[in-house]
Image: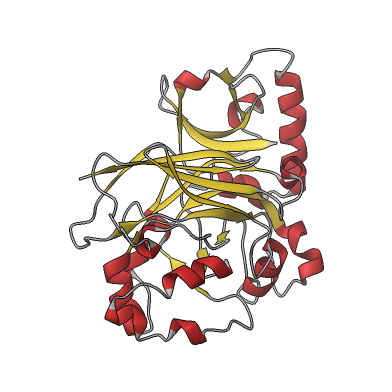
Amino acid sequence: MKLASFKIKSSGKATIGVVLADGGYLDLHGATNGELPARMIDFLELGESAMARARAVAAQAALGRSNVIPANDVELQAPVPRPGKIMHTSCNFPAHLSELTTWKEPEWQSHNWGEFHFEHPTGFLEAPSSVVPTGASVQVPHFTKQLDYEIEVGIIIGKKAFRVSPEEALNYVAGLTIFNDLSARDIQAREHSNKVILLGKSFDGSCPLGPHLVTLDEVGDVNNLAMVLTLNGEERQSSNTGNVIYKIADMVSWWSNITLEPGDVITSGSPPGVIAGRKDASYLKGGDRIDCNVEKLGTLTTFIVE
C-alpha cells in the first residue's frame, strides 16, 4: 500500500490517503467520516488497526469513486510533513566514504577520514522544519557556495520502539520513502572541523522527502532496491540498498537506543556520486533539477532556484 499526505487543491483540505492503482488518491479521513485522522503521524499512532482499515476502505474505493481525488487536484506534501525526529545516518555506503576522502577542503581533511572505522551506525539529528515535499523549489542558501545532493532511503517508524533487536526491527517500520539530503558542503566542512553538524544539513528545504510512504509488504526485499539520482537528466548516483555497511534493520535497532516514535524518520546514508567527490565539482545552482528514483518507491523531484 502507498500512503500519502496531501492537500486537495479545490477545497484546501489537508488530509492523508491511499494512492490507488489508477493514480487517484483516496481521502481516508473523508471516506471514513473522520474515523481515520487527517494527519499521518496521528494515523501511524493508531497502529495496525488503522492500516487494516485503510486497506479495506481502499478495496471498496476500487469499486466506486467516492472520496477519490484525481491526481490533478492533489498537491503532495511530504509523507510525514513534520517528523518528530530525523535520524541521519552518516557514511553507510563504503564507496561514498572513500570518495569524500578525496575532498581537499582543509576543514574536511582535519578529520583523517582514511582512518575512520565504524563499530556501529553514526549520524546526527536534522531539523524537522527542513522537510519539503516532492516538486518543491529549494533556494540556494545565501551562506553557501557548495550546495550538493545525496539520494537516500527514508525509513518511517510506525510504532514506538526502544532497544529492539535487528531481528524484530522491521516490525516497527511503517514503510519507506525517498530522501534527498541537500548539503551546504562548505558550511558542513567548517562544522565538521568543530565536531558538530547543524546548519550545513538543516537549513530550510534541505530535506526533500517523498513522494509516498510505501508499506513493507509492497516493497518486498528492502535490502535490494536500485537507487538512481539524476541531475538535469544526467545520471550521477547509481547503487543499491544492499551496498551498505548497516542494513535497514540494523539501523532501526541501533537508533532505537533513543526511543523512536511513529512518524520519526531514519535515513540510509548515501551512495557515491555526490558533487563534492567529483574532480569537476560544479555545485547546484538555480535552474537545476534533481530526480531521485528508488525501486518500488517512485521518484522524488527537487528544483533548485536562486
The foreground one among 244 and 20 is 244
Residue that extends furthest to the top in the rendered view of this protein = 64
- Does residue 197 appear in the picture of this structure? yes
Q: Quadrant of the C terminus?
A: top left
Is 209 displayed left or right of 195 in the figure?
right
Of 41 and 114, nearer the camera is 114
Residue at 57% in and 54% down: 154
Q: Is residue 240 left or right of residue 184?
A: right
Does the image show residue 124? no
Q: Position of residue 169 (x, y in %)?
A: 75, 64
Q: Residue at x 60, y 39 (%)?
A: 37
Residue 46's place in the image compared with 275, above or below, is above
Image coords of residue 66 (percent x, y): 63, 15
Q: On the rendered structure, is 130 left or right of 178?
A: left
Residue 267 spot, x, y in % from top left: 55, 60
- Who's the residue at 71% across and 44% down the image? 219
Expressed as whole percent of the image width and height from the top left, the position of residue 233 reads 41, 37
Nearer to the camera, 91 or 43: 91
Q: Is residue 67 above or below residue 198?
A: above
